Image (cartoon, helix red, strand yellow):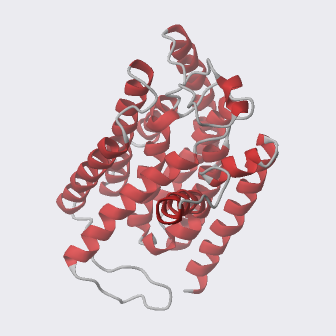
Amino acid sequence: MEETLLLSLASSLIIGFIVLLILRKFKFWQPIKDYGPKSHYLKQGTPTMGGIAISLSFFLNLVLLYNHLSKQLAFIALASLLSSLIGLIDDIAKVRVGTKGMGTKGKLIAQVGVSLLIIFFLKRMSLYDSRLWVPFLRGFSLHDILYLSFVAFIFVACMNAVNITDGLDGLACGSSILASFSLFLIALWQGNEEVGRALIIMIGVLLGFLYYNRYPAKMFMGDSGAMFLGGFMAAVSLILKVEILIPFICGIFLIDTLSVIIQLSSYRLRGKRVFLMSPLHHHFELKGWKETNVVALFWLIEGILSLFGVILYKIG
């Protein structure tokens, strides 16, 4: 496992450097939203679409370490790739057209469509299992239609949640490392070395990308990276049958997403805002917190919640 981690880390650093040069050459700058914190204007001119480096590094390591991908790994790779394509299209649209990119409705329609396509491959690969893992109720069964709807919801939710959280330097990347490590522990307990090694690859890749994405970021992952990670987390949770633990394992992503839902609902129903700005990480920025302190706090929360998810699995 140590060799896998080092190989994925080294390849991520090299590929990240090459991708960064290409993004700078073609001026794929991250558009800065007018309504965001004023401190973010300093980020103008930072390349986006760094998610290309994440996905390329991940797939390269899969090819190097496996002569033949099993159904499990093929599904995880396919689901991640399809998810990242939505983000890539949105990133290109933002750079070439405007900050809205595909727009909220456009992205949602694309995410639902991709989720249905992922479900199709899930069944074609004979990986479909309607038994939902629930703590203390391992044999609990759900109707196929309900379960498949739940699977689609997981993919759409994970893609959006990581994308929403990707608003500060290193926030989504570091949180994804912690979530991947928790899933790695669960994979080890299940004796699933194959998925465990894929998670080690992802951890190494993200550690390498974090070098470019930490404050002050030289490169943003963009929607292409955020949705790739969202699809990856959803696919791994399905393979390991721990879908119900996603709210804990990806806890900080859920918290940030809930803050957006609460803010929008409160404003539409009451005409008042609950937070100075949503997602929640921007609220703390407007309260005067340093960006690095907000990221450190959110990493800590993600670490605690993901560890709690692992404990729930162990005692469940």
- Percent across and percent down for residue 96 are 40, 18
As drawn, the residue found furthest toward the top would be 25
- Residue displayed at 54% across by 46% down: 202
As drawn, the residue found furthest toward the front would be 271
The picture quadrant where one finds residue 194 is bottom left
- Percent across and percent down for residue 133 are 42, 80
Nearer to us in this view, 127 or 35: 35
Left or right relative to 305: residue 104: left
- Percent across and percent down for residue 281 are 67, 50
Would you say residue 68 is visible in this rendering?
no
Nearer to us in this view, 133 or 297: 297
The relative height of residue 254 versus residue 106 in the rendered view (above or below) is below
Would you say residue 304 is visible in this rendering?
yes
- Residue displayed at 61% across by 26% down: 219
Quadrant where the image shows the C terminus: bottom right
Image mark count = 0
The relative height of residue 281 versus residue 91 in the rendered view (above or below) is below
- Residue displayed at 63% across by 61% down: 274
Nearer to us in this view, 83 or 35: 35
The relative height of residue 215 versus residue 134 in the rendered view (above or below) is above
- Residue displayed at 63% across by 66% down: 306
Left or right relative to 17: residue 163: left
The relative height of residue 260 versus residue 140 in the rendered view (above or below) is above
- Percent across and percent down for residue 253 are 57, 57
Left or right relative to 21: residue 275: right
